[in-house]
Image (spheres, rainbow, N blue to C red):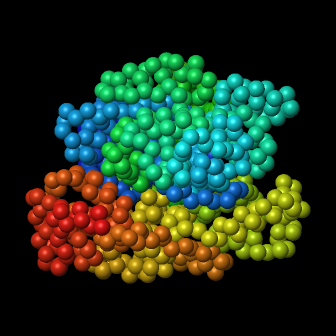
């Protein structure tokens, strides 16, 4: 595919170009999710990251049959660090989808109308509020008393930071009035700008490093093992939403804000109710113009459907609610020179060029590196060592190169030559037909890939082994102590090895004890996170979760994969029927579990005492729990999206094609081929009324 594909307007992409772009975008977003959530070292700005997701969504909308199973549409947050006890959120804490233009705000409102089957002229009232740049956290109250506090983590599991959050003056320990018997609120822990400036002054006076920005300082303060340190930091907490409640709080977002304020919470200030898209745009413009006067960092605006009954119907996708969106503020920019361009090798063999920059301050942060993604991106920018480039940054991230000043190019500059061979193992690099990424095909035989797979394995979205980062793993790798994931657990049981490690520089008895405890705690892991941790190509967090729900156990998944070598087998059909799983994912699973270099990784982990928990059972009280549904035709009272969302919320699996494994075909007006196939297979066909009865059963 031409290097210019990334420059082509979405509407002008051909089918092949769209497929190539989706592959490029999936790889890029996954790489940047890892950098931001796992490595705590993001490599692009918020705005550039959002643009990648936005372009991906736009292409998927035009070419729905090309949606990849590793699409960036099903990932959120980062799992909890291992230094705190894990807490399961009663209801998931999700991220928000982003919009970038006035037109996309209108599209958001139109999507809501369509999902709810409203008239085109129906008014959608929207609650708008500042998007505070802080650490997301939840507070749980029982009979008005604070009983637990947790970070968002990966949206499902967070860190128990109750003791730390209790030290915040803005967190009420006992609620006023008559709150519900059970109440969970959600908000942002933030650093007031004045307090942040004082903290950095004190840090520098004590000979310590200053914090990069208020958000990182707030996150670090909440995650202190000693809550006394948290108490000294003068943090704030604004409530912006709620989770589990034992009784309704109101009919609209606006009403609930007032009630929460009455209980003693500080709710997000500067909110407004908008009845037209023009009101939403005007609110954003006012907030952007006056953000420096707020006294805390704001990185955008959040828009929420105001009616709570509509919010409930809209529900959520795997990573974001459908009733809310965020609009980010523009990125900051600066110019600097590229000192060199090097190529790194990732865990899937991807060869990624990285630019080393002459250090430059962008938005108050000194940055010195930027990813160049792949060879196509280098060709698109025509970027070279020595070039004067524009970089942009929004938040604490490594910048994105957005422009090259060719007029300032040194006369001696030469075009960058992308290597034809892996710079680590020497194997000839390959580029598959539908991909923009150039890869080393050596797999685990390439030391760079084997090592990066280890780094992925311990990362926060996987086994979350805090204290065993890339630097520590590199030392253990180089002396051959840890060469595969199971070695981590073997070493944690090796008393002689642990004793020797405690005497090494940079360790000590306490740090070794903590590391051992973290590793032992990681032995019990959710099926979906175990599957993601293996680093199987094309198996991201979203489709790992779908596979876990569909197959329920590692043993059953491996059994299906072993039988799925032939596309004509029932096992292949069963895997292909899982939402989000297609031919590419099945090929990768079959290859991984058949490869004598990778299948033993799983076997060795189980032998080392890793316990892979079965997937959570669907709601037991639902007649749809565990059932597989397919929809066809047009339903009169529900949009297709709402019907699917409500079925999944009741524990059903929704597939796209009818098979012998289908339990129900929900048929509306205009059903045809799917209905005929269902009747031929003896699948029960439901009309809309019967489907609604099952939903309510």
Q: Residue pushed farthest right?
A: 503
Quarter of the figure with residue 193: top right
Q: Is residue 493 left or right of residue 445?
A: right
> Which residue is found at the position 46% from the left and 64% from the top?
544
| Residue placed most toward the observer, 282 or 417 | 282
| Residue placed most toward the observer, 437 or 506 | 506
Could you tell me residue 421's position as x and y percent?
Answer: 53, 55
> Which residue is found at the position 33% from the left and 74% from the top?
574
Could you tell me residue 394's position as x and y percent?
Answer: 55, 31
Q: Is residue 160 left or right of residue 48?
A: right
> Which residue is found at the position 35% from the left and 64% from the top?
650
Quarter of the figure with residue 586: bottom left
- 633 is higher (above) or lower (below) than 399: below
| Residue placed most toward the observer, 236 or 179 | 179
Does the image show residue 151? no
Could you tell me residue 525's position as x and y percent?
Answer: 59, 68
Total labels: the figure holds 0
């Amino acid at each position: 595919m031409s290097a210019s594909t990334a420059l082509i307007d979405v509407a002008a992409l051909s089918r092949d170009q769209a497929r190539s772009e989706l592959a490029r975008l999936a790889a890029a977003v996954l790489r940047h999710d890892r950098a931001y959530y796992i490595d705590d070292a993001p490599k692009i700005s918020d705005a550039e990251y959002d643009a990648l997701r936005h372009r991906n969504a736009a292409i998927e909308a035009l070419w729905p049959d090309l949606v990849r199973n590793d699409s960036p549409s099903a990932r959120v947050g980062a799992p909890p660090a291992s230094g705190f006890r894990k807490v399961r959120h009663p209801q998931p804490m999700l991220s928000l989808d982003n919009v970038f233009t006035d037109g996309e705000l209108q599209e958001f409102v139109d999507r809501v109308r369509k999902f709810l089957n409203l008239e085109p002229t129906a008014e959608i009232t929207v609650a708008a509020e500042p998007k505070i740049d802080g650490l997301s956290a939840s507070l749980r109250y029982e009979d008005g008393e604070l009983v637990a506090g947790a970070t968002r983590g990966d949206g499902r599991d967070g860190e128990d930071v109750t003791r730390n959050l209790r030290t915040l003056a803005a967190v009420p320990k006992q609620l006023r009035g008559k709150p519900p018997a059970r109440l969970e609120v959600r908000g942002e822990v933030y650093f007031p700008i004045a307090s942040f400036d004082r903290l950095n002054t004190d840090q520098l006076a004590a000979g310590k490093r200053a914090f990069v920005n208020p958000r990182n300082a707030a996150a670090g303060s909440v995650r202190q093992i000693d809550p006394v340190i948290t108490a000294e930091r003068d943090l704030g907490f604004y409530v912006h939403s709620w989770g589990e409640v034992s009784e309704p709080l109101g009919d609209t977002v606006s009403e609930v804000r007032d009630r929460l304020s009455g209980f003693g919470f500080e709710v997000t200030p500067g909110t407004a109710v908008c009845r037209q898209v023009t009101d939403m745009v005007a609110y954003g413009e006012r907030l952007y113009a006056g953000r420096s006067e707020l006294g805390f960092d704001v990185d955008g605006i959040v828009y929420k459907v105001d009616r709570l009954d509509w919010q409930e119907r809209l529900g959520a996708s795997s990573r974001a609610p459908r009733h809310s969106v965020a609009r980010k503020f523009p990125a900051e920019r600066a110019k600097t020179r590229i000192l060199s361009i090097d190529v790194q090798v990732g865990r899937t063999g991807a060869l990624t060029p990285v630019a080393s920059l002459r250090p430059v301050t962008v938005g108050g942060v000194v940055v010195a590196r930027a990813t160049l993604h792949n060879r196509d991106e280098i060709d698109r920018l025509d970027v070279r060592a020595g070039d004067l480039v524009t970089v942009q940054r929004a938040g604490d991230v490594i910048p994105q190169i957005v422009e090259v000043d060719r007029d300032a190019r040194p006369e001696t500059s030469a075009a960058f030559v992308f290597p034809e061979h892996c710079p680590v193992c020497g194997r000839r690099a390959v580029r598959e037909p539908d991909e923009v990424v150039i890869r080393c095909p050596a797999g685990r035989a390439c030391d760079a890939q084997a090592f990066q797979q280890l780094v992925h394995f311990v990362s926060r979205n996987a086994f979350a082994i805090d204290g065993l980062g890339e630097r520590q793993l590199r030392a253990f790798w180089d002396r051959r102590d840890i060469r595969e994931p199971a070695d981590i657990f073997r070493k944690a049981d090796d008393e002689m090895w642990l004793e020797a490690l405690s005497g090494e520089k940079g360790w000590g008895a306490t740090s070794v004890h903590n590391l051992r405890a973290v590793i032992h705690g990681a032995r019990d892991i959710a099926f979906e996170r175990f599957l993601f941790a293996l680093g199987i190509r094309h198996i991201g967090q979203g489709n790992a979760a779908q596979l876990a729900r569909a197959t329920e156990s590692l043993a059953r998944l491996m059994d299906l994969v072993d039988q799925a070598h032939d596309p004509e087998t029932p096992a292949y059909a069963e895997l292909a029927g899982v939402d989000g799983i297609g031919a590419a994912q099945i090929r990768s699973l079959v290859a991984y579990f058949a490869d004598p270099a990778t299948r033993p990784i799983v076997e060795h982990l189980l032998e080392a005492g890793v316990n892979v928990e079965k997937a959570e059972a669907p709601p037991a009280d639902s007649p749809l729990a565990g059932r597989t549904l397919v929809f066809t035709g047009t339903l009169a009272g529900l949009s297709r999206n709402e019907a699917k969302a409500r079925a999944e919320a009741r524990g059903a699996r929704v597939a796209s094609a009818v098979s012998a494994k289908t339990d129900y075909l929900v048929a509306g007006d205009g059903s045809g081929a799917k209905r005929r196939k269902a009747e031929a297979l003896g699948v029960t066909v439901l009309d809309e009324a019967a489907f609604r009865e099952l939903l309510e059963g």
